Amino acid sequence: MSYYIYIFFTLLQKIPGITLYQLVMLNDNCVIVMVPKCGTRSIRDALLHVKLGKKNQYLSASKKNLITAPFYKFVTLSKLKKIAQTKSVYVIHREWNDRIKSCWRQKIDRQESYFYFWQYYPFLRPGMSFSSFEKRVKSMPERFREKHFMSYADLYSIPELKRIDLGSLDNFLNDKFGVSYISNTTNA
């Protein structure tokens, strides 16, 4: 996948009502479903570490995404179910409430540039309290939630899917990539 197609699909994922799953193709037989706030940057940086060595630590986030774009794929749930029948598919799991709190901390409380959830303004807005943010996100129908707010319950209905707790991500990265580090946390 080219970088521009990656950007297109990333933007498409932000549109409420469009459900696409971002996959990282580790090799011909191993796939990770990228769930926001569940170690996605750590997975990307581990992949870069394998491909570039330690050189990646000085790259900007956009350069890292440019380099890793060919390893990503965006699919529907029905396509993901077919992939899971022939490949090992993993999802890093983190409880929904923990994901939402981390999301609020990074995207609302510590907002540094443009308002990330612009498509929900003024329903969601910069500087709102966590309790207001959580209440409003919970009130959204699932089909209108963008990727950060989804419950991902449909993923867990795929029996072949291998679920890994976020706390075990470091061991998983070591097993799959031969590297052991968590590259990014929002302390949430």
Image (tube, grey):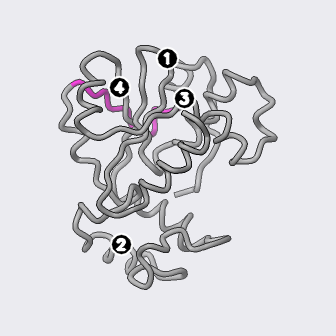
**Secondary structure type for disc 3:** helix
Q: Nearer the viewer, mark 1 or mark 4?
A: 1
Q: Nearer the viewer, residue 150 or 66?
A: 66
Give the x, y percent position of residue 12: 43, 55
Mark 1 = which residue? Answer: 27
Nearer the observer, disc 4 or disc 3?
Answer: 3
Magenta residues, as a range? 160-169
Residue under circle 4?
89
**Looking at the image, how many numbered discs can be counted on the residues?**
4
Q: What is the spatial separation of the Cα atoms under label 1 and label 4, in whole angstroms?
A: 11 Å
CB contact under 8 Å: marks 2 and 1 = no
Read off the residue under disc 2.
134
Q: Amino acid at mark 2?
A: Glu
Q: Distance between the Cα atoms at labels 3 and 1?
A: 9 Å
| Marks 2/4: CA–CA distance | 30 Å
As helix, strand or loop, the secondary structure at mark 4 comes to strand
Circle 2 or circle 1, nearest the eye: 1
In the picture, measured across the screen, residue 98 lies left or right of residue 76, that is right
Q: Which mark is first along the chain, 1 or 2?
A: 1
Mark 4 burial class by Cα count in 10 Å: few <14, some 14-19, many 20+: many
